[in-house]
Amino acid sequence: MRKHSTICVLLDIFLGSLSAVMACGNLLVIISIIYFKQLHTPSNYLIISLAVVDLLVGIVVFPFSMSHPLSSCLYYRDLFCKIRDSFDVVLSNTSIFTLCCISVDRYYAVCRPLTYRTEINIRVVSVMILMSWSISTLIAVGFVITELKQEKCIENCFSDVFEKIGIPFFAFYLPVIIMLYIYLRIYLVAQKQARSIQNIMNAGVTVSNGERKATRTLAIVMGAFLICWLPFFLCFSLQLTGSVTMQVYETLNWFTLSNSMLNPFIYAFFYSQFRSAFRMILSGKIFKGDFCNSKLI
């Protein structure tokens, strides 16, 4: 019994540490973009939306999941489980929809560079962010209504076909297919541009190295999301057949939540501007003067 309690305490400490790292990392991203004017771009406002989602996962969903594990919530649908599930659905869907918007932004930046600044502006990005959160909230409402119709489970609650096939398809698989198609188009256009760049003298026709690097970095963010979330959604669908154990499902659930910790590290590793911003914030330099117009390199 003592050994079991020790393991539980160590697991809580580990998960609590992940939650703290997740919250601090995404706060760095949010503060950096809000404070430094150089980072005030439509693309970065989409990144702020994604960072807010990841921050809320760290400070809301993680603590709920620690006190009410997924496996226990499958059998006992108490109030806290419903609240946790609601936040989980809203935030996970907002993540995937925001990533979908980011892929659209990258498509215009790489494939239509001459009209990018007029077609993707603050107003358009604001509409994208609003739609991402609104659609996710509507999906969560539908999820909760479905949950309210279910009684206390005897074996498990994976009986609603729409909930286990319809919602994953429209909320995950379809957006992922769209994103993969967009990034494939971007890759093909970038390859074509690379082959013809020597014959093009007008720099305005080509895509800058910064745009290429930004596209590559955000594609890595999407790749990390898929690696963490795809196994969970596959198991989510397979639960209809009862072929996945609760231990596997619980582990994959924690794996998906941990994805919210990765993005700040990806930005810091691939974006020199974010690295500079993080250093200035962590060193406390921004509290010693007005550095919002500083050149981040």
Image (tube, rainbow, N blue to C red):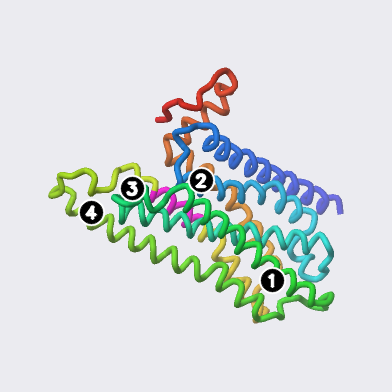
Callout 3: 10 Å neighbours few (<14), some, many (20+)? some
How many neighbours does mark 2 have within 10 angstroms: few (below 14), some (14-19), or many (20 or more)? many
Mark 3 vs mark 2, foreground winner is: 2
x and y percentages locating residue 63 in the rendered image: 75, 50
Mark 2 residue type: Tyr
Which residues are drawn in magenta?
Answer: 215-224
The residue at which mark 3 appears reads as: 212
Residue behind mark 1: 142
| Residue 111, picture quadrant | bottom left
Helix, strand or loop for disc 1: helix
Give whichever of discs 3 and 2 has the lower sequence position: 2
Task: Give coordinates of residue 171: x percent, y percent.
Answer: 57, 68
User: Which circle's residue, 4 or 2, is located before the other in the chain?
Assistant: 2
Please determine whether, in this image, residue 225 is positioned above or below residue 47: below
Q: Nearer the viewer, residue 266 or 33?
A: 33
Label for residue 45? 2
What residue is at 44 percent from the left and 63 percent from the top? Answer: 179
x, y percent for residue 64: 76, 54
Distance of label 4 from label 1 (alpha carbons): 45 Å
Circles 1, 2 touching at the beta carbon (< 8 Å): no
* Residue indicated by mark 4: 193
Q: Is residue 120 left or right of residue 29?
A: left
Measured along the vertical axis of the image, is residue 285 above or below residue 187? above
Labels 1 and 2: the sequence-earlier one: 2
Earlier sequence position, callout 1 versus callout 3: 1
Across and down, in percent, residue 251 comes to: 66, 61
Does residue 230 appear left or right of residue 83 in this picture?
Answer: left
Q: Is residue 151 magenta?
A: no
